[in-house]
Image (tube, grey):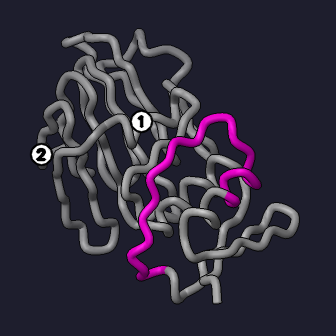
Amino acid sequence: VWLNSGSTLEYPVSFNSQKQRKVKLNGQGYFNVSHDEKHPFLVETGELNIKVLGTSFDVSNYSNDRFVSSTLEEGSVALLDLQGKEVARLSPGQESLLDKETRKLLIENVDTRLITSWKDGKLIFKNTPLPEVAKQMERWFNCSIHVSPELLGSDILYTATIQDETLGEVLKMIEISTSVITKTENREVKIVHKK
């Protein structure tokens, strides 16, 4: 398991005496699970449970996010409601998004690299809206980023790969490539429209 920043994973001391290998995730984790048909692996998120036999997948359920997501790279996973009933099954290259408010579940084909690159020490954006970029950068750089209200619905999209750059360098790239300016004080960043 790789855990992203601001994430916690609860697990038993030993899986040996249990029928299921059950863990509880808050935040985001990437799992590479060994196949064991007799002992399925279960990730509990509090909103949706993900059951696997052996596979590689990403689960994200930060408390301040509207969606619980699961992205499958290899294998197969079943999505279970809190009563244990299967509601969907993912194939490799698919992502599920559960809206915590409406309880609607959406499954779509995605470029898994964009979602799981964080575990390899990279953030990859491809035509990503500014609010989503800001949210991921907050976790990556452990800071607060406030996007001004007039930019929240804008059509500004970013394509970039962040690996070893500092927060200041990334903010400079954002300013150069679009019509925004950034102001940083301590670990707090404000992104506003350039006037």
User: Any magenta on residue 144?
Assistant: no
Residue 180 left/right relative to 88: right
Position of residue 163 relative to residue 13, above or below, is below
Q: Amino acid at mark 1?
A: Thr
Residue 45: percent from left, percent from top: 40, 47
Judging by the rendered image, the residue that carries numbered circle 2 is 88
**Residue drawn at x 61%, y 36% as measured from the top left:** 163
- Crowding around mark 2 (Cα neighbors within 10 Å: few <14, some 14 to 19, many 20+) is some
Residue 43: percent from left, percent from top: 37, 36
Asked if one can make out residue 35 in the rendered structure from this viewpoint, the answer is yes
Position of residue 18 relative to residue 51, above or below, is above
Position of residue 148 relative to residue 90, above or below, is below
Residue 66 left/right relative to 161: left
The quarter of the displayed image where residue 18 is located: top left
**Residue drawn at x 26%, y 11% as measured from the top left:** 35
Q: Quadrant of the C terminus?
A: bottom right
User: Any magenta on residue 160?
Assistant: yes
As rendered, which of 182 and 64 lies closer to the eye?
182
Seen as rendered, the residue at the extreme front is 176
**Residue drawn at x 54%, y 54% as measured from the top left:** 136
Residue 66: percent from left, percent from top: 40, 67
Q: Amino acid at mark 2?
A: Ala
- Crowding around mark 1 (Cα neighbors within 10 Å: few <14, some 14 to 19, many 20+) is many
Residues drawn in magenta: 152-172
For marks 2 and 1 on the same chain, the one whose residue lies earlier in the sequence: 2
Residue 133: percent from left, percent from top: 51, 59
The quarter of the displayed image where residue 73 is located: top left
Position of residue 170 relative to residue 104, above or below, is above
Give me the C-alpha separation between circle 2 and circle 1: 21 Å
Judging by the rendered image, the residue that carries numbered circle 1 is 116
Asked if one can make out residue 26 in the rendered structure from this viewpoint, the answer is no
